[in-house]
Amino acid sequence: MAGNETVDHGRRHLLHLAGGGLGWAVLGTGPARAWAQTTPASPLKIGSVGAGRMGGALGALCIKAGYPVMFSSRHPENLKEMAARLGPLAQAGPVEQAIALGDVVVVMVVPYAALEEIGKTHGRALASKPLVLDICNPIARRDGEAIVQWVNEQGGAGLASATLLPGARIVRAFNAISYRKLADDAHRPGGPVGVPIAGDDPQAIALAEGIIRTIGFEPVLIGGLARGKYLLPGTPLAEEHTPEEIRKIAAGLQ
């Protein structure tokens, strides 16, 4: 009970700081049994809750790699033109439909304050997924200094996300790479660009690594969610690095 009270208090505190409100996101996946039943001839489906700059760029790479993607938001009618432009593997719909569509992967790209509402509204569904790919960053100029301070008090973005999404199998990834570079960096000639990731669940990590490789990058596990605090803009891992460079930088982190 005490643990639940701590989670509830953290959620209420973040909601108070942020004033609530769902921003934009990318979401999708399904329970582990759905993943186990998926065959190579049946590509994993990815639901996209929102389609901001990073969400749209990442979703486009997933579609190019053969993953069906549903983009969604509170106003899905605004996403239909983008979905049509991306081709038959892209759809647009409401948030609930995007979450239900996903087979294995959940990808979220939201203003960090929006995790409060996502956790309250979709927490049970997210906890049933074998992977929640967390691309959310607490940014002071967008989310406010108070939220950044709260995240730091939790031990950083990885552990804070786990507090707001209890039970979710979270892997942080793509937190420190610009959406402007995604398309150019994917399948880069001469060697892949490294993508540092952090997570605690071995199955979720394996799923994330497979998807990241498929869309044209090389994942590099830097540690558990406690190390997710290093996957932010402005940190040593935020620059473009080779996989070996990421390993060397990660080895020097406290």
Image: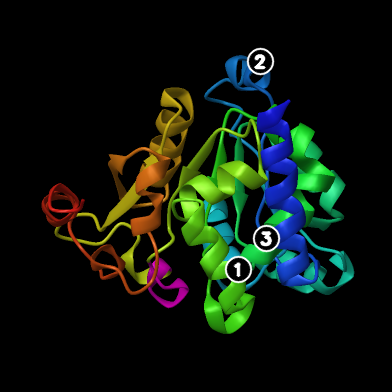
Mark 2 lies on residue: 33
Q: Nearer the viewer, residue 156 or 206?
A: 156
Query: Per the image, is 84 magenta?
Result: no
The residue carrying mark 3 is 25
Q: Is residue 20 above or below residue 187?
A: below
- Mark 3 closeness class: few <14, some 14–19, many ≥20 residues within 10 Å: many
Q: Mark on residue 147?
A: 1
Of residues 73 and 113, the one nearer the viewer is 113
Q: Amino acid at mark 1?
A: Ile
Tell me where residue 45 sits by quadrant: top right
Q: Does the magenta portion include 180? A: yes
Residue drawn at x 11%, y 52% as measured from the top left = 248
**Scheme by which the image is coloured:** rainbow
Percent x, y for residue 31?
68, 24
User: Magenta part of the protein: which range?
Assistant: 177-182
Name the secondary structure under disc 3: loop
Residue 150 in the figure: left or right of residue 118 = left
Q: Which mark is first along the chain, 1 or 3? A: 3
Camera-nearest label, 1 or 2 = 1
- Please state which of residues 43 and 160 is positioned toward the viewer in this rendering: 160
What is the distance, in whole Å, between disc 2 and disc 3 at their CAs?
Answer: 25 Å
